[in-house]
Amino acid sequence: MTMMFGALLATLPAHGADDLQDYPGLPGKMTGGCPSTFMGVTCADDVAKLDARVAILGVPWDSGTSARPGARLGPKAIRNHWPWGQQGSPTLDGYFDFDTGERILDGLTVVDVGDVLILPSDFGPNFDRITESIRRVRRRGAFPVVLGGDHSITFPVVRGFDEIKGKIHIVQFDAHLDFGVEPRESRLSHAKSMRRSSELPFVSGVTNIGVRGLNDDEDLIEGRKRGVLDAVPARRALELGWKKVMASIPKAEHYYVTIDVDVLDPSLAPATGTPVPGGLSYYQLKDALRELARGRDIVGFDVVEYSPAYDHGEVTAAVVEQLVASFIGEVFKSRR
Ligand SMILES: [Mn+2]
Protein backbone atom coordinates (compact mmCIF):
# COMPACT_ATOMS: atom_id res chain seq x y z
CA MET A 1 0.00 0.00 0.00
CA THR A 2 2.82 2.34 0.91
CA MET A 3 4.51 1.48 -2.36
CA MET A 4 1.39 2.25 -4.39
CA PHE A 5 0.93 5.56 -2.67
CA GLY A 6 4.55 6.41 -3.39
CA ALA A 7 4.09 5.53 -7.06
CA LEU A 8 1.01 7.71 -7.29
CA LEU A 9 2.86 10.68 -5.80
CA ALA A 10 5.68 10.16 -8.30
CA THR A 11 3.26 10.70 -11.19
CA LEU A 12 2.09 14.07 -9.89
CA PRO A 13 3.83 17.06 -11.47
CA ALA A 14 6.22 18.85 -9.15
CA HIS A 15 5.49 22.43 -8.26
CA GLY A 16 7.67 24.84 -10.18
CA ALA A 17 7.85 28.26 -11.75
CA ASP A 18 5.29 27.27 -14.40
CA ASP A 19 2.60 26.88 -11.77
CA LEU A 20 2.98 30.51 -10.87
CA GLN A 21 2.69 31.47 -14.52
CA ASP A 22 -0.38 29.30 -15.11
CA TYR A 23 -2.03 30.59 -11.99
CA PRO A 24 -0.62 34.04 -11.48
CA GLY A 25 -3.13 34.32 -8.67
CA LEU A 26 -3.45 37.98 -9.32
CA PRO A 27 -6.37 39.19 -7.28
CA GLY A 28 -9.58 38.73 -9.21
CA LYS A 29 -8.02 37.08 -12.25
CA MET A 30 -9.26 33.62 -11.38
CA THR A 31 -12.17 34.52 -9.16
CA GLY A 32 -14.29 36.49 -11.63
CA GLY A 33 -13.79 40.05 -10.40
CA CYS A 34 -15.43 41.22 -7.20
CA PRO A 35 -18.89 39.85 -6.38
CA SER A 36 -18.80 42.33 -3.49
CA THR A 37 -16.21 44.83 -2.26
CA PHE A 38 -15.06 46.21 1.08
CA MET A 39 -17.53 48.99 2.08
CA GLY A 40 -18.65 49.19 -1.54
CA VAL A 41 -15.41 50.62 -2.94
CA THR A 42 -14.56 50.16 -6.61
CA CYS A 43 -13.41 46.74 -7.78
CA ALA A 44 -9.94 47.05 -9.34
CA ASP A 45 -9.00 43.43 -9.92
CA ASP A 46 -6.48 44.11 -12.71
CA VAL A 47 -3.46 44.84 -10.55
CA ALA A 48 -1.32 45.67 -13.62
CA LYS A 49 -3.44 48.83 -14.04
CA LEU A 50 -3.92 49.57 -10.34
CA ASP A 51 -4.08 53.30 -9.64
CA ALA A 52 -5.07 53.94 -6.02
CA ARG A 53 -3.55 54.90 -2.69
CA VAL A 54 -5.02 51.92 -0.83
CA ALA A 55 -5.71 48.39 -2.10
CA ILE A 56 -7.86 45.95 -0.13
CA LEU A 57 -6.72 42.37 -0.78
CA GLY A 58 -8.48 39.23 0.43
CA VAL A 59 -6.54 36.08 1.36
CA PRO A 60 -9.07 33.27 1.91
CA TRP A 61 -6.64 30.76 3.42
CA ASP A 62 -7.01 28.86 6.70
CA SER A 63 -4.94 25.71 6.27
CA GLY A 64 -2.53 27.03 8.91
CA THR A 65 -5.22 26.80 11.60
CA SER A 66 -4.50 24.58 14.62
CA ALA A 67 -7.91 24.74 16.35
CA ARG A 68 -11.24 25.75 14.79
CA PRO A 69 -11.03 26.49 11.04
CA GLY A 70 -13.18 28.84 8.97
CA ALA A 71 -11.14 32.04 8.52
CA ARG A 72 -10.97 31.35 4.78
CA LEU A 73 -14.54 32.66 4.64
CA GLY A 74 -13.51 35.90 6.36
CA PRO A 75 -12.83 38.19 3.38
CA LYS A 76 -16.13 37.33 1.69
CA ALA A 77 -18.13 37.80 4.92
CA ILE A 78 -16.53 41.17 5.70
CA ARG A 79 -17.35 42.41 2.20
CA ASN A 80 -20.89 41.01 2.31
CA HIS A 81 -21.51 42.76 5.62
CA TRP A 82 -21.74 45.98 3.59
CA PRO A 83 -25.37 46.03 2.47
CA TRP A 84 -25.43 48.92 0.00
CA GLY A 85 -23.70 47.48 -3.07
CA GLN A 86 -20.73 49.00 -4.87
CA GLN A 87 -20.88 52.74 -4.59
CA GLY A 88 -17.44 53.32 -6.01
CA SER A 89 -14.23 55.06 -5.20
CA PRO A 90 -12.52 57.50 -4.70
CA THR A 91 -14.23 58.03 -1.41
CA LEU A 92 -14.32 61.76 -2.05
CA ASP A 93 -16.45 62.71 0.92
CA GLY A 94 -15.01 60.13 3.28
CA TYR A 95 -16.69 59.53 6.62
CA PHE A 96 -17.21 61.64 9.70
CA ASP A 97 -15.94 59.72 12.71
CA PHE A 98 -18.15 60.53 15.70
CA ASP A 99 -15.60 58.85 18.01
CA THR A 100 -12.83 61.30 17.12
CA GLY A 101 -14.72 64.27 15.71
CA GLU A 102 -12.66 64.06 12.52
CA ARG A 103 -13.39 63.41 8.86
CA ILE A 104 -11.40 60.50 7.45
CA LEU A 105 -10.78 58.90 4.05
CA ASP A 106 -11.91 62.02 2.17
CA GLY A 107 -10.09 62.34 -1.12
CA LEU A 108 -8.37 58.99 -0.64
CA THR A 109 -8.71 56.38 -3.40
CA VAL A 110 -9.45 53.03 -1.78
CA VAL A 111 -10.11 50.09 -4.10
CA ASP A 112 -10.70 46.38 -3.64
CA VAL A 113 -8.43 44.16 -5.73
CA GLY A 114 -10.28 40.96 -4.89
CA ASP A 115 -8.81 37.76 -3.50
CA VAL A 116 -5.52 35.97 -4.02
CA LEU A 117 -6.34 32.71 -5.78
CA ILE A 118 -6.06 29.86 -3.28
CA LEU A 119 -5.85 26.25 -4.44
CA PRO A 120 -6.43 24.24 -1.27
CA SER A 121 -3.77 22.47 0.78
CA ASP A 122 -0.39 23.40 -0.71
CA PHE A 123 1.49 25.96 1.35
CA GLY A 124 4.26 26.63 -1.21
CA PRO A 125 2.39 27.83 -4.31
CA ASN A 126 -0.33 29.61 -2.29
CA PHE A 127 2.18 31.48 -0.14
CA ASP A 128 4.16 32.39 -3.30
CA ARG A 129 1.03 33.88 -4.86
CA ILE A 130 0.26 35.83 -1.67
CA THR A 131 3.80 37.27 -1.64
CA GLU A 132 3.73 38.09 -5.35
CA SER A 133 0.32 39.81 -5.02
CA ILE A 134 1.71 42.09 -2.28
CA ARG A 135 4.77 42.91 -4.41
CA ARG A 136 2.59 43.83 -7.40
CA VAL A 137 0.25 45.99 -5.32
CA ARG A 138 3.27 47.80 -3.84
CA ARG A 139 4.96 48.28 -7.22
CA ARG A 140 1.84 50.19 -8.31
CA GLY A 141 2.38 52.47 -5.31
CA ALA A 142 -0.64 51.29 -3.33
CA PHE A 143 -0.81 50.64 0.42
CA PRO A 144 -1.87 47.02 1.02
CA VAL A 145 -4.67 46.26 3.47
CA VAL A 146 -5.09 42.51 3.80
CA LEU A 147 -8.23 40.68 4.96
CA GLY A 148 -7.42 37.15 6.18
CA GLY A 149 -7.43 34.30 6.40
CA ASP A 150 -5.77 32.71 9.38
CA HIS A 151 -2.65 34.24 10.89
CA SER A 152 -0.26 32.08 8.86
CA ILE A 153 -0.80 34.48 5.93
CA THR A 154 1.08 37.30 7.66
CA PHE A 155 4.41 35.62 6.87
CA PRO A 156 3.92 35.49 3.05
CA VAL A 157 2.34 38.97 3.18
CA VAL A 158 5.30 40.54 5.00
CA ARG A 159 7.67 38.63 2.67
CA GLY A 160 6.10 40.67 -0.15
CA PHE A 161 7.69 43.84 1.29
CA ASP A 162 11.19 42.59 0.40
CA GLU A 163 11.82 45.45 -2.05
CA ILE A 164 11.56 48.05 0.72
CA LYS A 165 14.54 50.15 1.75
CA GLY A 166 15.27 49.98 5.47
CA LYS A 167 13.88 47.72 8.17
CA ILE A 168 10.32 46.90 9.12
CA HIS A 169 9.22 46.36 12.70
CA ILE A 170 6.05 44.31 13.14
CA VAL A 171 3.44 45.38 15.68
CA GLN A 172 1.17 42.44 16.44
CA PHE A 173 -2.16 42.80 18.22
CA ASP A 174 -2.94 39.26 19.34
CA ALA A 175 -4.01 37.18 22.35
CA HIS A 176 -1.19 34.78 21.40
CA LEU A 177 2.46 35.30 20.53
CA ASP A 178 2.41 33.09 17.40
CA PHE A 179 6.07 32.47 18.07
CA GLY A 180 5.66 28.76 18.85
CA VAL A 181 8.67 26.92 20.10
CA GLU A 182 10.25 24.65 17.46
CA PRO A 183 9.61 21.90 16.54
CA ARG A 184 6.06 21.94 17.90
CA GLU A 185 3.45 22.38 15.15
CA SER A 186 4.28 22.75 11.48
CA ARG A 187 6.74 25.47 10.45
CA LEU A 188 4.12 27.48 8.61
CA SER A 189 1.14 27.14 10.96
CA HIS A 190 -0.63 30.23 12.27
CA ALA A 191 1.01 29.58 15.64
CA LYS A 192 4.43 30.29 14.06
CA SER A 193 3.67 33.29 11.87
CA MET A 194 5.59 35.82 13.99
CA ARG A 195 8.60 33.49 14.31
CA ARG A 196 8.73 33.03 10.51
CA SER A 197 8.23 36.75 9.86
CA SER A 198 10.96 37.69 12.35
CA GLU A 199 13.42 35.58 10.33
CA LEU A 200 13.05 37.76 7.23
CA PRO A 201 16.25 39.79 6.72
CA PHE A 202 14.41 43.13 6.49
CA VAL A 203 12.33 42.56 9.65
CA SER A 204 13.92 44.00 12.80
CA GLY A 205 11.58 42.29 15.24
CA VAL A 206 8.06 41.88 16.57
CA THR A 207 6.22 43.64 19.39
CA ASN A 208 3.13 41.82 20.59
CA ILE A 209 0.40 43.80 22.28
CA GLY A 210 -2.42 41.90 23.92
CA VAL A 211 -1.05 38.48 24.85
CA ARG A 212 -3.01 37.06 27.80
CA GLY A 213 -4.43 34.08 29.60
CA LEU A 214 -2.79 30.79 30.51
CA ASN A 215 -0.02 29.76 28.16
CA ASP A 216 3.68 28.92 27.85
CA ASP A 217 6.22 31.69 28.26
CA GLU A 218 9.24 29.82 26.88
CA ASP A 219 8.81 31.31 23.39
CA LEU A 220 8.74 34.84 24.83
CA ILE A 221 11.86 34.13 26.91
CA GLU A 222 13.62 32.81 23.81
CA GLY A 223 12.44 35.68 21.58
CA ARG A 224 13.56 38.27 24.14
CA LYS A 225 16.93 36.59 24.50
CA ARG A 226 17.43 36.81 20.73
CA GLY A 227 16.16 40.39 20.67
CA VAL A 228 13.45 39.74 18.06
CA LEU A 229 10.31 39.54 20.19
CA ASP A 230 8.84 41.51 23.05
CA ALA A 231 5.33 41.65 24.42
CA VAL A 232 3.05 43.95 26.38
CA PRO A 233 0.33 41.71 27.85
CA ALA A 234 -3.22 43.01 27.47
CA ARG A 235 -3.68 43.76 31.17
CA ARG A 236 -0.31 45.50 31.44
CA ALA A 237 -1.08 47.59 28.33
CA LEU A 238 -4.34 48.83 29.84
CA GLU A 239 -2.54 49.79 33.08
CA LEU A 240 0.20 51.65 31.21
CA GLY A 241 -1.97 53.51 28.70
CA TRP A 242 -1.33 53.63 24.94
CA LYS A 243 1.17 56.49 24.97
CA LYS A 244 3.60 54.53 27.15
CA VAL A 245 2.94 51.25 25.35
CA MET A 246 3.65 52.73 21.92
CA ALA A 247 6.72 54.57 23.21
CA SER A 248 8.14 51.18 24.24
CA ILE A 249 8.08 49.86 20.65
CA PRO A 250 11.61 49.74 19.15
CA LYS A 251 12.39 52.43 16.57
CA ALA A 252 12.40 51.36 12.92
CA GLU A 253 12.18 53.00 9.50
CA HIS A 254 8.85 51.27 8.80
CA TYR A 255 6.13 49.43 10.66
CA TYR A 256 3.82 46.65 9.57
CA VAL A 257 0.75 46.06 11.72
CA THR A 258 -1.00 42.71 12.07
CA ILE A 259 -4.30 42.56 13.93
CA ASP A 260 -5.56 39.17 15.08
CA VAL A 261 -9.27 39.47 15.85
CA ASP A 262 -8.68 37.44 19.03
CA VAL A 263 -6.90 40.42 20.62
CA LEU A 264 -10.43 41.70 21.25
CA ASP A 265 -12.67 40.56 24.09
CA PRO A 266 -14.54 37.54 22.68
CA SER A 267 -17.81 38.91 24.05
CA LEU A 268 -17.63 41.54 21.31
CA ALA A 269 -15.64 39.52 18.80
CA PRO A 270 -16.72 35.88 19.18
CA ALA A 271 -16.05 35.03 15.53
CA THR A 272 -12.53 33.71 15.78
CA GLY A 273 -10.94 30.26 15.99
CA THR A 274 -9.11 30.51 19.33
CA PRO A 275 -10.91 32.97 21.62
CA VAL A 276 -9.27 33.87 24.96
CA PRO A 277 -11.15 35.48 27.88
CA GLY A 278 -10.32 39.11 28.59
CA GLY A 279 -8.85 41.25 25.86
CA LEU A 280 -9.37 44.72 24.46
CA SER A 281 -12.63 46.52 23.88
CA TYR A 282 -13.37 48.07 20.49
CA TYR A 283 -12.55 51.58 21.71
CA GLN A 284 -9.35 50.41 23.38
CA LEU A 285 -8.08 48.84 20.15
CA LYS A 286 -9.21 51.82 18.11
CA ASP A 287 -7.35 54.19 20.45
CA ALA A 288 -4.27 51.96 20.36
CA LEU A 289 -4.16 52.06 16.55
CA ARG A 290 -4.63 55.84 16.59
CA GLU A 291 -1.70 56.28 18.95
CA LEU A 292 0.42 53.82 16.96
CA ALA A 293 -0.15 55.67 13.66
CA ARG A 294 1.10 58.94 15.15
CA GLY A 295 4.43 59.80 13.53
CA ARG A 296 5.23 56.29 12.31
CA ASP A 297 5.64 55.12 8.73
CA ILE A 298 3.13 52.30 8.57
CA VAL A 299 3.54 50.47 5.27
CA GLY A 300 0.62 48.05 5.42
CA PHE A 301 -1.59 46.03 7.72
CA ASP A 302 -3.74 42.95 7.94
CA VAL A 303 -6.73 41.80 9.96
CA VAL A 304 -6.75 38.03 10.37
CA GLU A 305 -8.59 35.16 12.07
CA TYR A 306 -12.08 36.52 11.46
CA SER A 307 -14.13 33.35 11.15
CA PRO A 308 -17.75 34.15 10.25
CA ALA A 309 -19.21 30.73 11.14
CA TYR A 310 -18.78 31.69 14.82
CA ASP A 311 -20.26 35.15 14.44
CA HIS A 312 -23.61 36.29 15.87
CA GLY A 313 -25.61 38.83 13.94
CA GLU A 314 -22.40 39.85 12.13
CA VAL A 315 -21.23 41.78 15.21
CA THR A 316 -17.60 40.78 14.65
CA ALA A 317 -17.88 41.62 10.94
CA ALA A 318 -19.01 45.13 11.93
CA VAL A 319 -16.06 45.45 14.32
CA VAL A 320 -13.57 44.37 11.65
CA GLU A 321 -15.05 46.63 8.99
CA GLN A 322 -15.02 49.75 11.17
CA LEU A 323 -11.53 49.03 12.53
CA VAL A 324 -10.10 48.61 9.02
CA ALA A 325 -11.71 51.81 7.73
CA SER A 326 -10.74 53.90 10.76
CA PHE A 327 -7.15 52.60 10.81
CA ILE A 328 -6.72 53.46 7.11
CA GLY A 329 -7.99 56.91 8.09
CA GLU A 330 -5.43 57.23 10.88
CA VAL A 331 -2.53 56.05 8.70
CA PHE A 332 -3.27 58.52 5.93
CA LYS A 333 -4.18 61.38 8.25
CA SER A 334 -0.58 61.43 9.47
CA ARG A 335 0.62 61.57 5.82
CA ARG A 336 -1.37 64.63 4.78
MN1 LIG B 1 -2.53 35.19 15.85
Image (cartoon, rainbow, N blue to C red):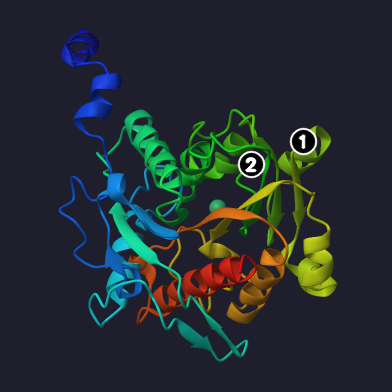
Q: Is residue 283 above or below residue 162?
A: below
Residue 107's x, y, as percent? 45, 75
Amino acid found under the numbered disc labelled 2: Phe
Determine the CA span between mark 1 and mark 2: 9 Å
Q: Is residue 300 above or below residue 229?
A: below
Q: Is residue 206 above or below residue 74?
A: above
Q: Secondary structure at mark 1?
A: helix
Pointer 1 residue: 222
The one nearer the camera, 160 or 193, is 160
Pointer 2 residue: 179
Q: Quadrant of residue 57?
A: bottom left
Residue 276 seen in this snapshot: no
The one nearer the camera, 56 or 264, is 56
The one nearer the camera, 191 or 53, is 53
Q: Quadrant of residue 80?
A: bottom left
- Residue drawn at point x = 77 percent, y = 62 percent: 246
Q: Secondary structure at mark 2?
A: loop
Left or right of residue 206: residue 192: left
Amino acid found under the numbered disc labelled 1: Glu
Q: Quadrant of residue 288?
A: bottom right
- Residue drawn at point x = 22 percent, y = 15 percent: 9
Residue 70's x, y, as percent? 34, 57
- Residue drawn at point x = 19 percent, y = 56 percent: 33
Residue 56's x, y, as percent? 39, 59
Q: Is residue 43 above or below residue 89?
A: above
Residue 187 seen in this snapshot: yes
Q: Residues within 10 Å of mark 1 (few under 14, many from 20)?
A: some
Mark 1 near mark 2, Cβ–Cβ under 8 Å? Answer: yes
Q: Which of the image's four quarters has the C terminus?
A: bottom right
Counting residues from the start of the chain, the first of labels 1 and 2 encountered is 2
